[in-house]
Amino acid sequence: MKNYIKYMAILALGIVSCEPELENSIEDDGFYSNGEADFSNYVALGNSLTAGYADGALYITGQQNSYPNILASKMELAAEGNFDFTQPLVNDNVGGLLLGGNQIAAPRFVLAGESALTARPARLNAMPTTEVSNKLSGPFNNMGVPGAKSYHLLAPNYGNVAGVATGAANPYFARFASSESATVLGDAVAQDPTFFTLWIGNNDVLSFATSGGAGVYQQNNTDFATYGPNDITDPNAFAFVYNSIVSQLVGEDGSAAEGVLINIPNVTDIPYFNVVPVNPIPLDANTAAALNAQFGVYNTQILPGLVQAGVLTEAEANSRKITFAESDQNYVTLVDEDLTNITGILQQAPFNLDPQTAALLGQLRQATSEDLIPLTSSSFIGTTVNDNPMLVNGVSVPLGDEHVLTASEQAVVAQVTTQYNAAIASIAQNYSLGLVDANALLSQIGASGGLNYQGIPITSQFVVGGAFSLDGVHLTPRGNAVIANEIIKVINTNYEANLPNVNVGEYGTVSLSNNVQ
Amino acid sequence: MKRLFLLGLFAMATAITYAGGYRVSLQGQRGLAMGHTGVAMVNNAELAFFNPGGLSFLENKINIAAGASAVFSDVVWQNDEFGQMARTDSPVGTPFYAYFSYKLTEKFSLGFAAYTPYGSSVEWEKDWAGSHLVNDIDLQAIYIQALASYKITDNLSVGGGPIYVSGAVNFNRNLNRTLTDLEGNRSNVTVDASGVSAWGWSAGAMWKPIDSLTIGVNYRSEIIMQAEGGDADFQNVPNSPLTPFEDTKFDAELPLPAELTVGVSYQLNEKWLFAFDYNRTFWGVYESLDLDFENPNIPDSENPRNYEDSSIYRFGMQYTANETFTLRAGYYFDESPVQSGYFAPETPRNNSNNFTGGLSINVSDRVAIDASFLYSHFDEIEESYNYYEENGQQVPFEGTYKSSAFVPGLGVTIKI
């Protein structure tokens, strides 16, 4: 009888060990496939967007929600054999950087406030702990380097810790560059990637825009050594550099790696330029009248006089008129470097203005709805100069060039972006690589009403839109999930692969905390 | 003996069972081995559960039956659109029963019962894709019942008694699909209530029109468990008035539905007995699982369930091999009370085919060991829970589910 009980027990255990199994399990070989591509060693190249930078900082959960990391989690399901995707994680979820113990980059933004109406982004009140000189030993699959422009990927010493303080090197690359003289591309190619994504070139035009056009358009200048940080890269030089990066990634016979190129969104689709209105100045009747009186001679005598003298066209003179009204929506005043500089003329007869007033009026105009104010200028407009209530920035004192992206600056940015994207498209075609049209995607998100993605409304509205983090430039985890999905779409089409989608609704947007500076 | 063992194997191979919702049909090893039939069977003290009306038909003065089962139940879920998969790693459940009856007179018996007809223990991987619906749940209810049975005529007997229920629930879920603290830890809430008590009753009748045929009916009342002042413990909530979640108390209601059983058993000859039971479980009472938080700033949680009354069809047979061995086998079809679109992963039950088997070994005239097993076969099913809302918009949680359950059990029967 003992034996029977023993057999029963064995039989029972046999059944107990049977876990429920699905007929078609996603864990089965071949459920998903990499098609003609090979995901076994995926390397992501790019800038802050690729690194997972968000909310004005690089922090761990941002990195974990980078689009390459999200994409890799899906590739893993289809990859044959071992799959690993490593990232140069920073030290904390505070964000910011230390160099030799001194803070050189600020902590992340969080959304702070007592109610939904008063909530505003603010820097987290915490000390960064990520020390740039603490070298990580790589290599890392995510080679995204915040701040990198196209030509930086080819620049030796870009990760030299000693060059960080002077701005000659990049602190983020310095953390994980294989050597002081290493290049980003060199460290990527050394990993023998079988698949790559490349999203580079944003900063070649974006830093000009976010600086309010404070840099220079380096048209026809191919000497990157002479470029300033806010300059626009020459489109031909960009195309040359971009082609060089791609050719090294695909290898000499073009068979080393497959990949996907991601093009450059229009900078005007980001909340950074859509938060601060150009007409934020509230004035009562008395103040408006006083200001109008102040600019009365300028509007009614000086400008018409200059038209008569043939210095200004009628149209330019009209664009330079300054008028205020009793309203909450007066347009800011600004210095526009594209206007005819009349500082010298105004000091001569018949105007005979003092040099200070002449300089004030030299390239003065009032903003129009065509101009854009960078997000960072919101805290500057309306402040006074030397606590003098008569000298109000944006009103009696015009905003400097860096506070306004003018219509003509926007036109340059748009045109250059188009040229970059044409170059990227033709390179994608030449090398038979996938191409993700991030420009079109973000235009849809930026359009009124935004995009309904998997049933979730996603817009470019600041804070609440879902796509953009609290710095107004970089993507939220949800925005990254959308990008990852678009890349998956292109991979599936271009390489006849079968990767599952990303469930965008599972990715968050902005983080809340009242522990702020 | 060898022949008996082979019959046992056959029984196992043909066996399927587990009840829908959070009903756990494991109230007696002898009944369970026969597809959890028993409303029309005079076998042992298990009658205290299956049909207290039949207690006075038990021949011995003192009848005791007690036992426990080990529930190995797991679920796998996947969503192939998004390449996601999760498995439960549920702890082994141990429902038990203890029944006692005492024949005061030839016509009148008293009894006592303790059993656990409702319960659920499901543990998903923490922060899995459905974690906004449930991470883990542990639901327990112990029924304690005093019974009396009276033989009206030689072939008709009735019985019943009041039920006292003591229950406890512990439930954890994430607050939504995305909220985290600054370290990326998902915000979640654990609700915990224990010592929740309520009263109900059961009553049954048994009729033996001829010696070989028994007909039974039994009804167990609905019992609403009302948890008042349970603890709601919020974890990893961001430091912001925009997420006003803080530890508080909660009230909630969970119905333990009424169940009506009618059945018949037929003693073919000395060796063979066949039984059929029909259960109707009145799940319709379970419309919604609502958590009412004491703190007015915390939005109440409403989770439509919309269960419907459901039926179970049970078949069992018993083969008395010799004085020592009795073998049993059974089958039941368990209709799920969960309607399409309401398939929530805390009780992911679809219809099941259930196979049972078991045996009793008479160790002595007075003592028998009862063993049983249950294997529940669930078809793979594509289902969704459509009533989770985000910003006023329904966000379905979809996927393919496959459940399995295997429940070995052991008990003892004593007749004095």
Image: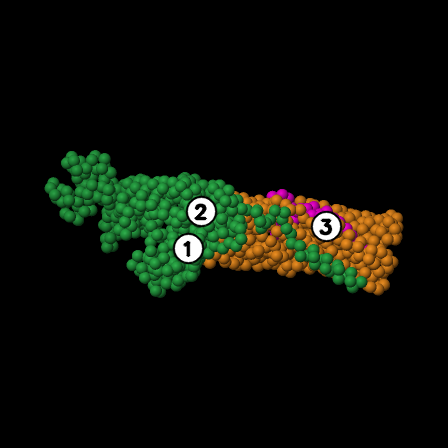
Chain colours: A green, B orange
Percent coordinates x, y for residue A339 in the rendering: 22, 41
Residue designated by label 3: B16
Q: Chain of mark 3?
A: B
User: In the drawing, does residue A9 fall left or right of residue A223?
Assistant: right
Neighbour class for label 1 at 10 Å: few (<14), some, many (≥20)? few
Residue A43 visible in the picture: yes
Q: Quadrant of residue B362?
A: bottom right
User: In the drawing, does residue A441 fall left or right of residue A328?
Assistant: right
Residue designated by label 2: A255
Q: CA distance from mark 3 to mark 2?
A: 56 Å
In the rendered image of this protein, does residue A104 appear above or below residue A22?
below
Percent coordinates x, y for residue B47 in the rendering: 79, 55
Residue designated by label 1: A190
Circle 3: residue type: Ile
Q: Element type at marker 3?
A: loop
User: In the drawing, does residue A304 fall left or right of residue B164?
Assistant: left
- Residue bounds of the magenta highlight: B327-356
Instruction: Please check the rendered image and state whether residue B329 is part of the magenta-colored stretch, yes or no.
Output: yes
